[in-house]
Amino acid sequence: MKINEIKSIIKDFENSNLQVLEFESNDVKLKLSKNKNEEVTRLNEPQAHKEVKEVVSLSEIKEPNLPKSVIKSPLVGTFYESSTPNGKPFVSVGQEVKKGQVVCIVEAMKIMNEITSPVDGKIESVNFKNGDVIGFNDALFTLV
């Protein structure tokens, strides 16, 4: 199974009403849960042809001391700071943003998804560089 197929399964699960999904094929076993007490299996792809499985209990995950507001990624994909390769970034450090304002694009399976700010604030930091691969729930921006 290819990583793009796994990403598609995860995206479909996120958009569904299902609370738990278990999937198993010859080379992959995947368990997804929206319940906080369930175990979640994450698949990482450190190299092009290797998959590493890691089981993490959601109760063991503790977020670091995050600032007042964080804009998180709603999906796995590639981070883009502007709409064109040489374009001006949507936002930069020190810039004020309004709720609903587009702050970046995350490409997932050749679909460009605009990510908007859930709150008003000032950009304190941009946590990824243009073209970086990001994961679900990664903190893309910190706001003051």
Image: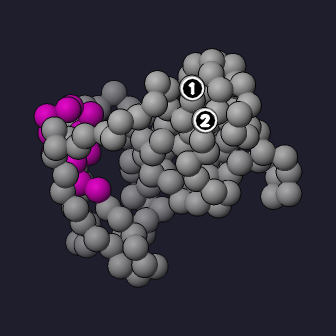
Q: Nearer the viewer, residue 124 or 16?
A: 124
Q: Callout 2 environment at 10 Å: few (<14), some (14 to 19), or many (20+)?
A: some
The quadrant of the picture occupied by the C terminus is top right
Tag 2 near tag 1, CB within 8 Å: yes
Q: Quadrant of residue 141?
A: top right
Q: Is residue 36 left or right of residue 126?
A: left
**Can residue 100 be seen at all in this image of the molecule?**
no
Q: Is residue 21 left or right of residue 49?
A: left
Displayed quadrant of residue 6: bottom left
Q: Mark 1 — residue?
A: 144
Amino acid beneath label 1: Val
Residue nearest the observer in this picture, 88 or 95: 95
In the rendered image of this protein, does residue 49 appear above or below residue 119? below
Q: Identify residue type, mark 2.
A: Glu
As drawn, 36 above or below 128? above
Q: Which residues are magenta?
A: 32-42
What residue is drawn where x is 29% and y is 56%? 42
Q: Does the rendering let one see residue 88?
A: yes
Identified at 69% across, 39% down, the residue is 93
Circle 2 residue? 124
Residue occupying the point 27% across, 34% down = 34
Cα gap from disc 2 to disc 1, whole angstroms: 6 Å
Residue 100 location (% of width, % of height): 66, 21
Find out whether residue 36 is within the magenta segment: yes
Q: Residue at x 73, y 37 (%)?
A: 91
Q: Secondary structure at mark 1?
A: loop
Pinpoint residue 98: horizontal percent, then vertical percent. Answer: 69, 19
Front residue of this view, candidates 35 and 23: 35
Mark 2 lies on a secondary structure that is strand
Q: Earlier in the sequence, mark 2 or mark 1?
A: 2
